[in-house]
Image: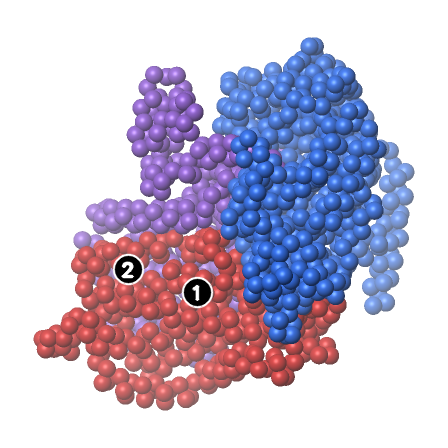
Amino acid sequence: MFQYVLRRLLQSIPIFFGITLFSYVLMAAAGNPVAQLVFRPGVPAEERARLEIQLGVNDPFHVQYLRWLTGDDWMRRDTDGDGFADQCVVLACDADGDGQNEQPGERRGIIRGDFGLSFTRNRPVSDIFWERVPATLELGFASLILGTVLGISAGILAAVTKGRWFDNVTRVFAVALTALPIFWFAIMLLLLFAVQLRWFPIGDRCRLSLDDSCPPIWERWNYMVLPVIVLSVGAVAGYSRLMRASMLDIIHQDYIRTANAKGLSSRLVWFKHAARNALIPVATSLGPAITALLGGAVVTERIFNYPGLGLTSLTALSQRDYPVVMAFTIYAAIANILGYLLSDILYGLIDPRIRFN
Amino acid sequence: MSEKSLTPAPLLRVIKTAEPAAKSQSLTTKALRRLRRDYLTLVAMAVLLVITLLALGADVITREILMTDPEATNPSVRLLPPGSPGHVLGTDDLGRDYAARLLHGGRISLAIGISGTLLTLLIGVATGLIAGYFGGWIDDIINWVVTTLDSIPSIYALLLLSTILTRSPVNLVLVIALFGWTGGTRLLRGQTIALRDQEFVIAARAMGASAWRIMFVHILPNTLSLILLSLGSGIGGLILAESTLSFLGFGIQPPTPTWGNMLGNAQQFFSRGPHMATISGLLIFVTVLCLFIISDGLRDAFDPQSKD
Amino acid sequence: MKRISSIFLVLLALTAIFVTAAAAQDPLGPGEGLPVVWGNFAGDIATTNPILVADGSSADVVARLFPLFIGLDPDTGVETPGALRSIATGWEFNDDGTVLTITLRDDWAWSDGTPITSADIKYAYDAIVSGEVDTPTASFLATIVGLEIPDEQTVVITFEAADCAAVTVASNIPVVPAHHYSTIYPTFADMNTENANNLNPEVTAGPFTFGNFRPGEQVTLIASETYPDSPAGYVVPEGFIYKSVTDQLIEIEQFLAGDITLISSVAEDRQAEMEERAANGEFQIHKAPAGGWQVLLFNMGDPANPQPGLDDNGERIEQAPHPILGDVRVRQAITHSIDHAALNAGAFSGTGLPVGGPMLPQSWAYNEDIAPYAYDPELAAQLLDEAGFVDDDNDPATPRVATEDALYAEAGTTLTLALTTFTGNPSIDSSSILMQDQLSRVGFEVTLDIIEFSSMIDKLLAQTYDMLMVFWGVTNNSPQDMYDQLSSESDIPGAGFNTGSYYNPEFETLMQEARTLPGCDQAERKALYDQAQEIINAEVPYYLVNTSVVPFIISNAVENFDPRENSLTWNLPAWSLRP
């Protein structure tokens, strides 16, 4: 088991590099961020040039990638302590050619968790990232739990009542919900339950307060209800369909027939034997479910003004704040890799036929 | 277990339709018989057919019946409700005939959905066949690309790319294909692995057939039903994705109408022009619903395990 | 229906009772009012250090935390000695107009008790011009050659030349707590990285002190007990909450629910409804002219080969004209093809106004005699005919084609232009679609290129566009903006703001004269600016499409809301929201 996890983690390394390379290529293709930073009348060309050198946006692509990936603290080092770099590899010590060496590199690169400074907020990207994580995590977890519990139970019940009204209603709903444009559904919920009926707050994560207090989650659950519903719709629909299908798949199999033939009560057969085995494909879809949640967070947080990762990355995207967008993409990708890993482990735990060797 | 350790678990779910092409004749007959009794799917097919025909005839209908131009603006008659004289479904915020725009928008939305799905499948099928048939390092590389792409939430990638590219339908299709093909690869790869050691493939190989011939003549036809089944949900998914992009402000650029950007635009007029959001939203919903129902219906009908 | 209207009547009566009752109550004491909650669309603040401010959110918050060097009069919008929240009490020029001596008040201290002095100005100036700090302000101070502080209440600024806008230039220098900053930032360059200090200011002197910053949610400020400039004598609201919102729907509903105190933009969809509800007394609406325009820029230089206006020695570089837009008649034809009334109905929700002269009407330098361009498609067609662009096939659906008579275009060139603009703004979207349609009726073929904002800026600065539509905000009512946008010295591909490569030496001379006029007599300067505006109006280097009246909606709970022509929030510290 341990060896298996270790091997899977090792196999994730090339994937991680693939992700960094890919997102970096995308980001680089998006062009030069300096233009927007200095979109003010009268900014002289020298100011722009200085900023460009400072941000290193004119370096060759592979240098920029390497710097971003591994940092520049080893590229420009200050050995004599005068505040300027004197030992330089890859990068020139005096990049702008003014006769004065540049300051030593301070970035540690994304492989050491340093995503640099945000272009627009002038703060470390990792600060911005981590302060937004809790909001997305609380929504994500709540939705995942709601989605799996509701979806799996609906799926089992539908399979048990195959052909009867509950089954039909569940099936219709499962398809109909996935066929709705999700942002449309979210806006309708907001307009109806928050604006019209005033059952829930109109967006946001906490109440306003002059002091810096956001109450614990159980005191502000009402803020989470609508976004969680929206975010879990896909999971409920998907899981109920998947669970129903795999339940029906299982009951045709021999061992269930045997169990039935042995005279075991049908409830026991359904829930102990069939449900347990039917959970296998459900467990394996945990990875994709996490991907879907992270994607859904963009739309949901945007509509409900929920200050999480999705909302921030959307803002960063429209401001072409590359470091922020890249950090978010890469962290999301890591979450996905871990999600898939978790899926596989669950797969093995539930299905005794699988051995991790 | 080496297979397993390389790839995430869903890849292992080999679908059990591995049988030579000849046998699928009777399967098709049976499936058609089942379909004839599946009224829900039949209704969905009829509705979709009507929507498709309307979209195809957009030009003629607009010119001959509605007698208007989907691009002609006239702010003095803006936000008219449905049923207004000369405008069956009312007008939008710039006074353009809503019915005409829906017809033209439908044509583009459907075209995006269909061509995006086809292109996606094309890449996916090719890579899946190659990876599954050859295995080894080719498989490893394709797998690496697939897993990498799958790990990046596609909405980030889509949003990112739409900031770079002109937001035209063609570019959107290309971007969708760039990120969407991995599903097809996974599907085909599993199938190919299952089929490549079957007797009829071994026989073909013994008779000196080239690898490409085996892949495209012997293996591919046996996976066709599976590929076709994923068309419906693929098209529906893309129509939804296009509308989400539009909502976030990264959809097809105006004045080209699509259902997605019409719905995205309509959210600014909830109170003064509610017909816009209602009609375009409903059209997307109904179309996607039909596609999903058909997709489900076909899957049930073609499932060799299901009972008559 | 009857029931609803009777409910309204009851509500009206209740409001009336409430208002009269409130008026009779005693005024609230210091910090006794509810906090003012302000919706913020512009994203998180980047800094609270006035020297570093480069974005709207940070500027909004800094304006509540720090004094100004030189303040504006809320009625006229002109720099005025002794204006509220400012420390300059008077200024004078020397004889040749190059040295400006400013005196400061001595009755105001930072929150830690240290008096505010000229050293605080000197420190900020030194930091900005040091080149070590990432600040946009440096370019605004480029004409200053020296700043001295002979004593604690005097600042002496030397300019490179006499400048009638010298006070405006000086007003860009922020006031910062030098004694505090010099300890938390060992060097100026440390400001760029010391985020802990930049986002948690300990020493301030505005109407509020810093409370907390919850990213993505809110910045809160607490009423200052020592602020001397509140019209009420003390700061009435307990605090100020700068609340993040991302969606107009959310903002307006939160306002209606009472969570937000005021909103400064209303989506078109809700405008009529809000007017009606305001008329019913549910809240107060104040309308103010926008400080800028939606503008259609023309590229008069060849977009295939952008050249700077001047070479390194300041000599004029002749550059190839735009084949179509290089001809002034084509530009005029465009202005006459566009129907502002239709744009106003379709894109500006009826709040738009056509623009006359190229300065804000509220500016003293505005030329009242310039009328907006008339919508006249026949005149446009005639101008195009004269310019050598004709409808050769008599099919209005196809674009016009250049004949041998065209000034710059080769014969056979179709009248095709790209209109570049940016995504995400409904009025930009709608007006560009309407313009495309309107121009096509006269024989233009316009292709829309609606791209992401920063890509558009790239294209704008690179001078590779044909026509480009943006919003222009105008700072400080300063006529100088017009010079920056149209002079050959700011025609620098990739950096300058004369992106259309406009060149008119007479215009440049007039603008320079007006700026450096000895004695700076306003009437004489205005005469010069009037002439410059007439040139611009005749030569159409850009077309000011629209300006708007912006509604400012504020809750009835606010007492003492006193909007003035140039500032709606000048007395915010005196606003009273009863608990």
Mark 2 chain: B
A6 displayed left or right of A54: left
Instruction: Count neighbours of disc 2 (C-alpha within 10 A) and say few if under 14, some if 14 to 19, many if 20 or more.
Output: many
The quarter in which the N terminus of chain C is drawn is bottom right
In the image shown, does B301 or C266 lie closer to the viewer?
C266
Rendered image: mark on residue C83? none
Disc 2 residue type (three-letter): Ala
Q: Residue furthest front?
A: C404
> Residue C82's image quarter?
top right
Q: Quadrant of the C terminus of chain C?
A: top right
Q: Earlier in the sequence, mark 1 or mark 2?
A: 2
Q: Secondary structure at mark 2?
A: helix
Q: Amino acid at mark 1?
A: Val
Identify the residue position indicated by label 2 in the image: B9
Q: Residue at x 36, y 82 (%)?
A: B301
Q: Which residue is mark 1?
A: B173
Which chain appears blue?
C
Name the residue at 30% across, 55% down: B145
Provide residue A21's location: percent of width, then percent of height. Answer: 34, 47
Q: Residue at x 71, y 68 (%)?
A: B74
Q: Residue furthest top?
A: C151
What colour has chain B? red
